[in-house]
């Protein structure tokens, strides 16, 4: 058995860090051409074996926990931000339980309650944000969209008290914590940089926000009981009989906030940019609102959201062309044979999946580079749908050798997909009801991608022009 080929590089420790970091897809495609679907590159001294294509995706996502470990790949980055004892700072079986607890708080009943809350936040944002005053204007997406996704997710999933704190007492703290969630912290989380000191202070203060809310709720001081994730987690306990401690609840809440914020923010930003570039898609979305809600546009509801096929296809297509997470990593725990090859990956390596590569491959999608939501029409059933995996993490799911896996698969699969669809569907519907968007004059296409962040963002300045729909 052989080891996978190593990507040529000049400097031992640096390896391919810079080319990978600047343009990961260009790097993956070039290596695929030269070495095939399986190859190893050096990322700041670490040996990363990439496995591309649907089979490669399956290899990483469906790896057994004894062979491939996520916590060793991610804990340096996530634990200082989320806090101790949860997610990647506990044994994997506890994460599996924590994910079930979280899923418990993401039911049809909660989604029904969330849709009007999210809609109200979006409308309130238009009414109060200086970016949306008057009949037309332009909006810098890198400022406006993070606010919009933070306010909507916090008002619904996180709860009213968290929403209030995030615009008042805790706005700056959230920002400091967020600054600790950067790629450089994958490798150097302990660097005594000023932003890491701020991150640690902000983590404690954010945890205290949740601890105070929990204690007020426990003492009965908080009488306005709304459905939210904090209430849900307060009622869960591990199989061992141990309850989820208040601190673990706080840390799970921070993990949910961070996991949802970056992914939804990137998806909303790219959606607006592509809509601005293609007025015909805005028209299809608006026509669909009229068809489903009537010409007076009745209020959005959770039930009706699932009838909005065009909205769903737009989100699906955005996640194909701009999956927020370009690299999925695991630490190899014992030498692993790569199926259908002669390669064995030694236990000193990490493995990496990049499902975005197969999602943009001509082999699986015609005109793969083009943003075309209509390609999904009639293929709704082909999608890697959530039900298949519902409560299925921990199990090795069949049929995950898919070229399209924006939410991952297997035991680490996303639990936030349905929430993300509710949030994005409500935001997009509300936006197209009110506005028409266009790119700035002279700009023909959406901006290039900036990979210097946790998620694939649009290169600055990401601007769209808007005008109010008549009537
Ligand atoms: C896991 C993508 C939204 C919570 C994942 C994974 C992906 C992903 C690819 C797998 C990571 C891995 O295997 O290493 C996305 C995308 C989103 C999104 C594209 C939105 C468009 C959310 C939201 C939440 C969330 C809104 C919370 C409400 C989680 C959690 C995990 C996860 C808890 C599990 C991590 C693990 O088991 O290791 N997500 N996510 N995500 N996501 Fe999401």
Image: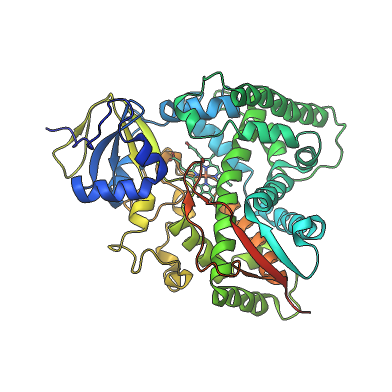
Q: Specify whether residue 244 is in view.
A: no
Quarter of image, res 308? bottom right
Q: Nearer the viewer, residue 201 or 75?
A: 201
Q: Quadrant of the N terminus?
A: top left
Q: Specify whether residue 79 is in view.
A: yes
**x, y (%) of residue 2?**
13, 33
Q: Is residue 224 left or right of residue 69?
A: right
In the image, what residue occupies the spot 53% across and 34% down? 182
In the image, what residue occupies the spot 58% across and 52% down? 420
Q: Is residue 279 above or below residue 202?
A: below
Q: Is residue 237 left or right of residue 154?
A: left
Q: Is residue 200 above or below residue 372?
A: above
Q: Nearer the viewer, residue 90 or 109?
A: 90
**x, y (%) of residue 338?**
21, 39
Badge count: 0
In the image, what residue occupies the spot 47% across and 24% down? 188
Colour setting: rainbow
Q: Is residue 244 above or below residue 441?
A: above
**x, y (%) of residue 109?**
68, 53
Q: Quadrant of the C terminus?
A: bottom right
Q: Is residue 95 left or right of residue 48?
A: right
In the image, what residue occupies the spot 54% across and 69% down? 277
Quarter of image, res 135? bottom right
Q: Nearer the viewer, residue 333 or 230?
A: 333
Considering every residue shown, the one lying at the far front of the view is: 442
**x, y (%) of residue 271?**
56, 61
Q: Is residue 224 left or right of residue 273?
A: right
């Amino acid at each position: 058995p052989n080891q996978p080929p190593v990507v040529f590089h000049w400097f031992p420790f640096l390896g391919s860090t810079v080319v990978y970091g600047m343009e990961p897809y260009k790097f993956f495609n070039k290596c695929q051409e030269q070495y095939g679907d399986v190859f190893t590159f050096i990322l700041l001294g670490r040996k990363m074996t990439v496995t591309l294509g649907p089979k490669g995706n399956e290899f990483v996502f469906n790896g057994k926990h004894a062979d491939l470990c996520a916590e060793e790949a991610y804990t340096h980055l996530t634990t200082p931000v989320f806090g101790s004892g949860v997610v990647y700072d506990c044994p994997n079986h506890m994460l599996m339980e924590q994910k079930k607890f979280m899923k418990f708080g993401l039911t049809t009943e909660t989604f029904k309650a969330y849709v009007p809350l999210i809609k109200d936040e979006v409308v309130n944002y238009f009414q109060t944000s200086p970016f949306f005053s008057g009949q037309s204007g332009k909006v810098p997406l890198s400022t406006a969209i993070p606010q919009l996704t933070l306010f909507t997710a916090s008002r619904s999933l996180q709860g009213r008290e968290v929403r209030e704190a995030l615009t008042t007492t805790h706005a700056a703290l959230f920002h400091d914590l967020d600054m600790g969630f950067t790629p450089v912290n994958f490798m150097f989380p302990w660097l005594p940089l000023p932003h890491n000191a701020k991150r640690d202070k902000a983590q404690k203060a954010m945890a205290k926000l949740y601890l105070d809310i929990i204690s007020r709720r426990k003492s009965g001081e908080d009488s306005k009981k709304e459905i939210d994730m904090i209430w849900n987690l307060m009622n869960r306990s591990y199989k061992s009989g141990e309850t989820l401690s208040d601190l673990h609840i706080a840390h799970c809440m921070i993990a949910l906030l961070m996991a949802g914020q970056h992914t939804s923010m990137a998806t909303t930003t790219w959606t607006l940019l592509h809509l601005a570039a293609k007025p015909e898609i805005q028209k299809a979305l608006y026509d669909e609102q009229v068809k489903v809600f009537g010409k007076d546009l009745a209020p959005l509801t959770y039930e009706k959201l699932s009838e909005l096929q065009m909205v769903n296809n737009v989100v699906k297509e955005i996640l194909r062309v701009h999956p927020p997470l370009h690299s999925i990593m695991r630490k190899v725990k014992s030498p692993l044979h790569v199926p259908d090859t002669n390669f064995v990956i030694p236990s000193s390596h990490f493995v990496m999946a990049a499902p975005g590569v197969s999602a943009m491959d001509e082999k699986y999608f015609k005109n793969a580079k083009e943003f075309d939501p209509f390609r999904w029409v009639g293929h709704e059933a082909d999608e890697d749908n959530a039900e298949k995996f519902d409560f299925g993490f921990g199990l090795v799911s069949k049929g995950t050798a898919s070229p399209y896996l924006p939410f991952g698969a297997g035991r680490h699969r996303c639990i936030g997909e349905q929430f993300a669809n509710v949030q994005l569907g409500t935001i997009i519907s509300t936006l197209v009801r009110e506005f028409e968007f266009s790119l700035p004059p002279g700009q023909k296409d959406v901006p290039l991608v900036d990979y210097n962040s946790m998620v694939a963002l649009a290169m600055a300045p990401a601007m769209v022009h808007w005008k109010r729909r008549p009537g």
